[in-house]
Image: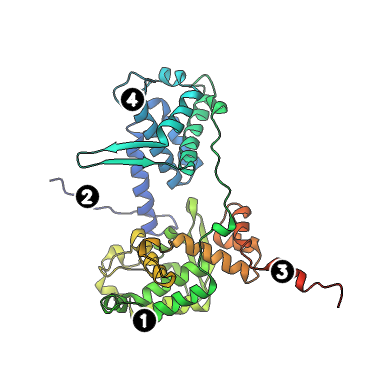
Amino acid sequence: MVKKKTLKVHNKSDKPDNIVIKDNEIIEKCIEIEQKLPNFIRDYFLYLKSAVALSTRLAYLNDILFFFNYIITQSNLSNATNLKEVTVEDFNKITAKDINRYLADYCARYTITTKEEMRIMENRNRSLARKKASLSTLFKFLYRDEIVKQNITDGLNPIRLPKPQPDAIKRLEIDEVAKLIDHLNSGDSLSEREKVYWRKTRLRDRAIVLMFVTYGLRLSELQQLNISSFNFNRGEFTIYRKRGKEVLIPINKTCEHVIKEYIENERPMKEQINDENADALFLSLQKKRMTSKTIRNLIKKHTAIVLGTSTSSGYSPHKLRATAATSLIQQGFSIYDVQNLLDHDNVTTTQLYAAHKKNVKREIVKNFEWLD
């Protein structure tokens, strides 16, 4: 059995080690996929490195790997028997009709068969649009670099995505957030068995929820928080956004209080934690940095209790992000300020949450009477 090598970080950047390690895990996955693919698209890999975020790079590469597998196992587009053997000549024969057929006929519904099971995979339009975007960037790049002779992407069929409706955005109402905080403080809604665990993690869970509903953090942003991320003397903390953007966020009194209370009264002592997890803010009972999956599950569990539904129907951290956006706008903050706080690329995303201002039209005309 090969002994797993110890990973050491020689970090001269401003990023904390845990984010460098997380990024490295994604980079290693990208390299692993790239090594399976033909050499003629190697320059495209370099393009992705500089053009998109790390998570997007991995998603695109997975889509392209999936397409190459389709070429050699499900189509007559190539005589290759493995991915490396697919040639530029094969790609020059691919037409827009072939891609449209791949997206509409194959990607919409396919099966994965293993020794134990046969899994049916259904993709909705949003997933198909992502697969189409991955291939579009590849073919446009190959055409620009004169590797293929035609830009076939002009002939790709549009994939229509339903316009998001404000009323369909799931989020907690302000009174439900209050109930959630009361539930985390008291544990009254829990069984005696559940309370055993709750007593060990209530301060941690309350701090996690309040950070989500106050700042609308992404799950990855919260999961990567360290104790060293916080400068309580200056009243601020540091997070790393998409594309590795370092951002300073002011901390309010509520969040400062719950974070300090958790650190001082519930988080394990420094000497009980190994070096790898010593700086991690939110720890599991095993004294390790909480995983994204664990955080997602605890949010779904607690919100399900407040909503009176099953755990599987509880709300995800992303819905608490929507809760923060809606609540801030209802409190009268500008959509541009909320856009900046939540790091939305486009203000139209933030405007969806502005539509949740209840009865705003009624209140406007009610207070604007022309006759007594």
Precedes in sequence: disc 4 or disc 3: 4
Q: What residue type is disc 2 on?
A: Lys
Q: Quick one: which residue is furthest to the left in this view?
A: 1
Which callout, 1 or 4, points at the residue further toward the start of the chain? 4
User: Could you say where residue 115 lies in the image, as x and y percent from the top left?
Assistant: 19, 39
Helix, strand or loop status at disc 4: helix
- Whether residue 217 appears in this view of the structure is no
Q: Could you tell me which secondary element the residue under label 3 belongs to?
A: helix
Q: Residue at x 42, y 17 (%)?
A: 89
Q: Quadrant of residue 227?
A: bottom left
First in sequence: mark 3 vs mark 2: 2
Residue nearest the viewer, comparing 261 with 320: 320
Dot 2: few (<14), some (14–19), or many (≥20) neighbours within 10 Å? few
Give me the residue at 71% from left, 69% from top.
362
Q: Which mark is residue 362?
A: 3
At label 4, counting other C-alpha atoms closer than 10 Å, the crowd grade (few under 14, some 14-19, many 20 or more) is some
Q: Position of residue 135 (x, y in %)?
A: 47, 32
- Choose the circle earlier in sequence order: 1 or 3: 1
Per the image, label 2 sits on a secondary structure element best described as loop
Question: Which of the 4 image quarters holds residue 229?
Answer: bottom left
Q: Looking at the image, which is closer to me, 52 or 371?
A: 371
Q: Alpha-carbon distance for marks 3 and 2? A: 65 Å
